[in-house]
Amino acid sequence: MGRMIRLLDKSFKVFMWYAGIVLTCSIPAYYAIVDYIWQTELKEHNTIVSEEIKNNLQSQNFSDSVLNKSVALWNQLQPSSHLREVTELKSDSTYNIYRKNNFSKKEERFQGLTSYFQLKGKKFALSVETNMEESHETILGLALVSLIFFVLLLIGLIILNRRLSDKIWQPFNSSIKTIQEFDLNRHDLPVFEETDIVEFETLNTRLEHLIKANINSFEQQKQFVENASHELQTPLAVIQSKLDLFLQEAALSKRQSEIIDQAQNALGKANRINRNMLLLAKIENNHFEDREWIDLKELLQENLEMMNSFIEAKRLSVALSCSGITKIKTNSTLLEILLSNLLTNAIRYSKENSKIDIQVSGHYLVISNPGTQALKQEHLFQRFGRVNNETPATGLGLAIIHQVCLQFKWDITYAFEACQHKFSVNFS
Amino acid sequence: MCETAINFPQAMEKTELYDYDCILLDLMLPGGDGLKILEALRENKKQDGVVIISAKGSLDDKIKGLKIGADDYLTKPFHLPELAARIFSVIRRKSFDNTNVIIHHELEINILAKKVVVNRLLVSLTKKEFDLLLYFISNKNRVISKNALAEHILGDIADMLENYDIVYAHIKNLKKKLADAGCGNYLKTVYGSGYKWDV
């Protein structure tokens, strides 16, 4: 999966691209229109001016010499028009040129009109010019305005986008939050916020259906496991008794009693798995509702006492250190199961002559024992996650620990530091 | 003499008519709740020993059964020698009027004081060794599997056994202490699959 973006940002990006393209395209269009209007207006203006000049000239009664002088004077004084004598009359023509201005030394653009007329038998050409905005300046101006509007659009859309995403998507975000908080292990059905948006309402209804079905099948599954393990107990007991009875037969051969022994071992494991499954199901089905004040330290000491023969057999040393107030209010059975499972694991997986460290500070417990390799986190607390056939482990010990922690919302973490397996439980 | 009641009314009838040393009571009887029988027994001030056998293993069920007046509570599945030991213990308590001394040839076991005397010589046993000895005596002439032994002396934490070395060590010590005190060798190994207190 690539970089995650928000839904609205995605549409926002597309919109901005589109707006940018449209605004860029508008620049030549505006220019064409502005230039066209301007040119037309200036042409009209030039025509009016030149007609007026022609009329004025024709209405004067100049003598030849005065006329020549006047034309020279005119050409000298009037920068925007020019009179000259020509040999033949032509039809009027317009032109548009760039040339250097005498004063500003800058290229200027001019719109001009050359018209021809006769005065006192002489033929004259009159050019009238008007300064016009250069096209690059027009384009620059238009581009600037477009840019300003684009920036305005951008800012406006960003603000709107934020507001919209907060407002429009609010029911959606609320649904997501509800789902995130939903926990199959707790029995409460999530309540979705009411909304008047059809799509969100449909989403919520469908989610509700889905979750209800989920809870139902989970309940059934839990009930099934409990019933199944319960029902298995009696037949398992019968097999156990029959094997014990069989062992009493006087004429058993060595081979036969070995077979019984192997069957007993397998049966023992089946019994333990069944007992642990039943326990898991019972925790899940909230069979342990009693709460009382228990001292972690005392319970740990009791458990260690019980396991003393194992500790001695492996010549392990156990260091228990406690500080702070170690009393917690919880279910005594479950706490005892949790502690004894943690201790059992630490003892079972420690090499001979090693040291197990148990620290209780207030409501925080850390049990560490030496190891060679970190355990795989992903399957650690899963049922039958690490079961193998060589040890009597049922593969449910850590799953039970995990389930107890879930039940009381305790935080359990595993870490492998400095060649030590560390299981920490936060009881608060 | 051993009698069987296959359902609730039969069990009620028999317990009303006769006195038994020990009743094995399954809680899930066809036709009724086993606990009702126990209640009726205790209401009539009957002193029959009662061992409840049940598939219900939760602490609450156990406490409830013991409160009404059961002498012991055994959760299915269990090993037969375990049941034998419990029955033995119940009967002994009921019939020896709490003298609490078992005499077996040169062996004398005081259960209350947890003392073992061989030929009037005190043998000092650990709690586990004493427990084992009592278990063997309760299962005279029966083969006891290693599994059953381990579960008896270790309880639930027998789960963590990788092998039965710990159990062997306890048995070895017990055997040695008894032999040193001059007690006959009654504890026999059966083909490596179990033990038997042979008399």
Image (cartoon, grey):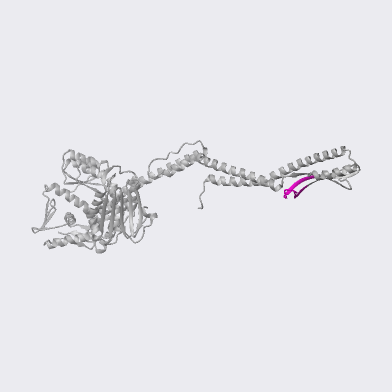
Quadrant in the picture for residue A46: top right
- In this view, the residue in front, B176 or A1, is A1
Q: Is residue A4 visible in the rendered structure shown here?
A: yes
- In this view, the residue in front, A383 or B70, is A383
Q: Is residue A76 left or right of residue B3?
A: right
Total number of numbered labels? Answer: 0
Q: Is residue B146 visible in the rendered structure shown here?
A: no
Q: Is residue B83 left or right of residue A12?
A: left
Task: List x then y, in percent, for residue A343.
Answer: 28, 54
- In this view, the residue in front, A9 or B24, is A9
Q: Residue at x 59, y 42 (%)?
A: A152
Task: List x then y, in percent, for residue A190.
Answer: 42, 40
- In this view, the residue in front, A150 or A326, is A150
Name the magenta segment's main secondary structure: strand
> Which residues make up the magenta segment?
A96-112
Q: In this view, does A210 lie above or below B132?
A: above
Task: List x then y, in percent, for residue B115.
Answer: 12, 54
Q: Residue furthest left?
A: B120
Q: In this view, does A383 lie above or below B178?
A: above
Quadrant in the picture for residue B69: top left
Tell me if residue B31 is in the magenta stretch.
Answer: no
